[in-house]
Amino acid sequence: MERPGKQQQDPRVASAMDHVLAAENSLQADLEAIREAADGQLAEARLNARRVMERAERRTADVHRRGKRQLEREIAELKRAAAAETPAAEPGPELLQRMRDAARLFAARLTSGDDEH
């Protein structure tokens, strides 16, 4: 803001106008400093937000990986348990011997000639 020519003003008015202009300039400089500080804080806040998001994404991915591994372990354990409960396709040696003994006993009874089966 410019002040009118000095010839037309009273020295007190000119001095007051100089003070007003100096105060305005000082306020403008203060506002600019505040804007710069705010911009710096905003940039820092954005950087911190980005870091937090990246850390959250890493942690989420880690939780998913651990959950997947745990699920895979539990599925494998269930499969092992199911396999243990399912009879094998081939009978074990003990069961084979019992079946042979039962077949011999049955054959002996059929061929013995006793009618008391």
Image (cartoon, helix red, strand yellow):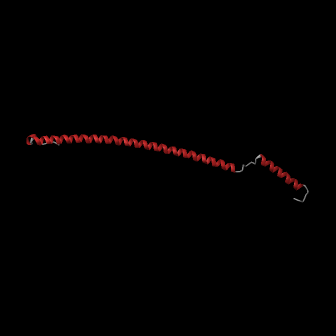
- Residue depicted at 37% across the width and 41% down the height: 44
Image location of residue 11, percent across then percent down = 10, 40
Image location of residue 68, percent across then percent down = 56, 46
- Residue depicted at 83% across the width and 50% down the height: 101
Compared to residue 43, the image places residue 107 above or below, namely below
Question: Could you tell whether 98 is left or right of 64 in the image?
Answer: right
Image location of residue 46, percent across then percent down = 38, 43
Figure quadrant of the C terminus: bottom right
- Residue depicted at 68% across the width and 49% down the height: 83
Figure quadrant of the N terminus: top left
User: Which quadrant would residue 66 be assigned to in this image?
Assistant: top right
Question: Could you tell whether 31 is left or right of 88 in the image?
Answer: left
Q: How many marks?
A: 0
User: Which quadrant would residue 5 be assigned to in this image?
Assistant: top left
Image location of residue 28, percent across then percent down = 23, 41
Pick whichever, 17 or 109, lies toward us.
17
Q: Residue placed farthest to the left in the image?
A: 7
